[in-house]
Amino acid sequence: MNILDKIVIDKRKEVALKKSIIPISQLENSVLFDRPTVSLAQALRNSGTGIIAEHKRRSPSKAVINQNSSVSEVAVGYEHAGVCGMSVLTDGKYFGGSLDDLLLARASVQLPLLRKEFIIDEYQIIEAKAYGADVILLIAAILSREEIKAYSELAKQLQLDVLLEVHNEEELHKSIMPSIDMLGVNNRNLKTFELSLETSKSLSSLIPNDFVKVSESGISNIPAIKELQPYGYQGFLIGENFMKTDTPGKSATDFINQLK
């Protein structure tokens, strides 16, 4: 059993428990539920840099990354840096995140916010909307085509953008449908945690131009982005590179200024 399998087993238990405590009707009565959302896909299309910056405390592959920076400070720093959007990890057990992180980020900035989570139930999509997200992540490796369709269509009904993450050609083929806004290619093999930008390059020609192409993981320098832009990538999700510094916002500012 690999790490992704373990995460999904734990996530199913976590979601079942949450559903038994907080009914969907309560989530739908949240103050943020009717808030107009901001499109990350549109922001990426209109940007020359395309940076989506992440808030991440730790990960299964790197243990502790940054336990000290407050979510609000990081969010404000990213917004000042001129990022297109912010990814907020809400998984607690493996990444040290929470839905409160999403709430704090939402209270601090106007940026499009991506709920970075292992979504295995429609409940989590309603939850994302209730906590102020603008975008959800769907991971093709853990979902069937039917689930991708149902979850992405629900997200569209809630005015949420959908970033669909793939790792290989097989996952890509089952994921192409009109209810997806952005196709993200994860350069990290979730089973072995190895990284290679070749994954983004090899899959780029198979992604129709209707979708915003996003490259995720292993992007830690300007040359990596310059290398991927000719392949049609307009979005670049950067997590550890900014978070491993004491001032993620300043790191993002310096990075974006170099990229311009």
Image (tube, rainbow, N blue to C red):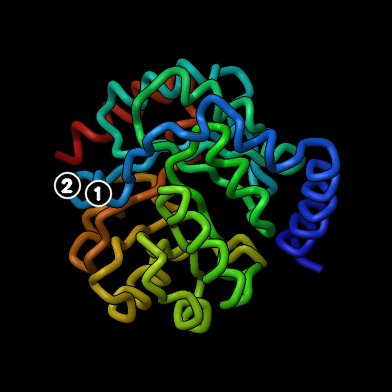
> Residue at image x 41%, y 44%?
238
Residue closer to the observer: 162 or 230: 162
Q: Mark number for residue 42? A: 1
Residue type at mark 2? Asn
- Across and down, in percent, residue 203 comes to 37, 76
Say whether residue 119 is left or right of residue 9. Answer: left
Label 1 Cα neighbours within 10 Å, binned few <14 / some 14-19 / many ≥20? some
Identify the residue position indicated by label 2 in the image: 46
The C terminus, quarter of image: top left
Mark 1 touches mark 2? (CB < 8 Å): yes
Residue 50, above or below 215 = above
Q: Quadrant of residue 112?
A: top left
Residue closer to the observer: 244 or 105: 105
Label 2 Cα neighbours within 10 Å, binned few <14 / some 14-19 / many ≥20? few
Q: Mark number for residue 254? A: none
Residue 141, above or below 218 = below
The N terminus, quarter of image: bottom right
Residue type at mark 1? Gln
> Residue at image x 55%, y 30%?
102
Residue 214, above or below 142 = above
Q: CA distance from mark 1 to mark 2?
A: 6 Å
> Residue at image x 18%, y 65%?
230
Q: Which mark is nearer the camera, 1 or 2?
A: 1
- Across and down, in percent, residue 158 comes to 47, 48
Can residue 17 be seen at all in this image of the molecule? yes
Say whether residue 260 is left or right of residue 165. Answer: left
- Across and down, in percent, residue 235 comes to 31, 52
Say whether residue 151 is left or right of residue 87. Answer: right
